[in-house]
Image (cartoon, rainbow, N blue to C red):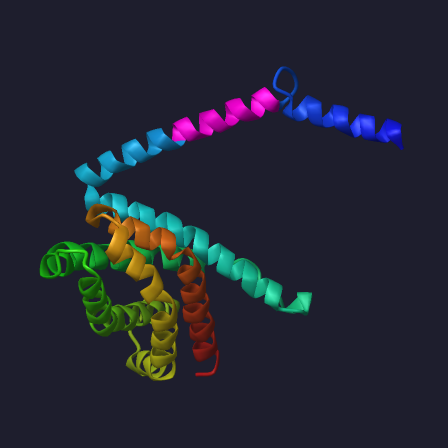
């Protein structure tokens, strides 16, 4: 037993020791990661200054490009019968990336820059709640309508179908809004209260990873069912 303890102790010394072993390697690796992260943040700030919209489009595309595969993975894990698990849908991920790039990023970039931050410039608590209230009742519903319409049209191979779009909105608009109202305001409170305006869309994308998983699952699951049971 004592020999085993000595072996474990020597192993820890080898890994985390100050003079020898992997301890220095871990420390060097951590410093390198921190240095590269700082450089990335520096470059990212420059991109936001030079090309704000393009940078935000790229940021949102990357975030939803992470969220949708995670959403698909969780959907597969929830299916107990492995034979019924669907293969990874690359077309669905492409649809979400395209939608976030062409709809999400430009809409909210203009929303914050042109209207909301000018209309409510300070960060007082009452102003934060005003922003949340205005956004929840204006841009959020409009955005969800537009994205649902886009999603149905994309899944219908680009053909406009008023009946399917109307059915989709009647069936899923309010459930989606209720879900959004229960998740998004907390994230947006932090967004409005603490995040600088030029980082706002990027923060919303990062904080929206979890929401992106829910949103992607909600949108795509319902669209598939709607088309199957037409």
In percent of the image, x 24 and y 57: which residue is there?
Answer: 192
Magenta includes 69?
Answer: no
Q: Is residue 17 left or right of residue 219?
A: right
Q: Is residue 116 visible?
A: yes
Whether residue 213 is situated above or below residue 12 in the rendered picture: below
- Which stretch is magenta? 23-36
Rendered location of residue 194, percent (x, y): 27, 52
Rendered location of residue 103, percent (x, y): 26, 60
Q: Is residue 30 left or right of residue 201?
A: right
Q: Is residue 212 left or right of residue 69?
A: left
Rendered location of residue 105, percent (x, y): 26, 54
Q: Quadrant of the C terminus?
A: bottom left
Whether residue 17 is situated above or below residue 105 in the rendered picture: above
Residue extending farthest to the top is: 19
In percent of the image, x 57 and y 60: which residue is there?
Answer: 87
In percent of the image, x 61 and y 23: which residue is there?
Answer: 23
């Amino acid at each position: 037993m004592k020999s085993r303890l000595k072996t474990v102790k020597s192993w820890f010394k080898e890994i985390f020791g100050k003079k020898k072993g992997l301890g220095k390697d871990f420390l060097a690796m951590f410093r390198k990661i921190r240095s590269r992260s700082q450089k990335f943040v520096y470059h990212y700030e420059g991109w936001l200054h030079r090309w704000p919209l393009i940078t935000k489009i790229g940021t949102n595309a990357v975030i939803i490009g992470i969220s949708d595969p995670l959403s698909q993975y969780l959907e597969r894990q929830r299916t107990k019968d492995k034979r019924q698990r669907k293969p990874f849908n690359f077309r669905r991920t492409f649809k979400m990336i395209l939608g976030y790039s062409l709809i999400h990023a430009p809409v909210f970039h203009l929303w914050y820059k042109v209207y909301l931050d000018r209309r409510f410039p300070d960060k007082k608590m009452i102003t934060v709640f005003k922003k949340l209230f205005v956004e929840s009742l204006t841009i959020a519903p409009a955005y969800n309508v537009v994205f649902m319409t886009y999603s149905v049209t994309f899944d219908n191979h680009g053909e406009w179908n008023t009946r399917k779009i109307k059915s989709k909105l009647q069936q899923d608009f309010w459930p989606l809004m209720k879900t959004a109202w229960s998740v998004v305001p907390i994230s947006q409170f932090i967004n409005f209260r603490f995040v600088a305006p030029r980082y706002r869309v990027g923060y919303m994308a990062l904080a929206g990873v979890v929401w992106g998983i829910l949103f992607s699952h909600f949108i795509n699951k319902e669209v598939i069912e709607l088309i199957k049971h037409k």
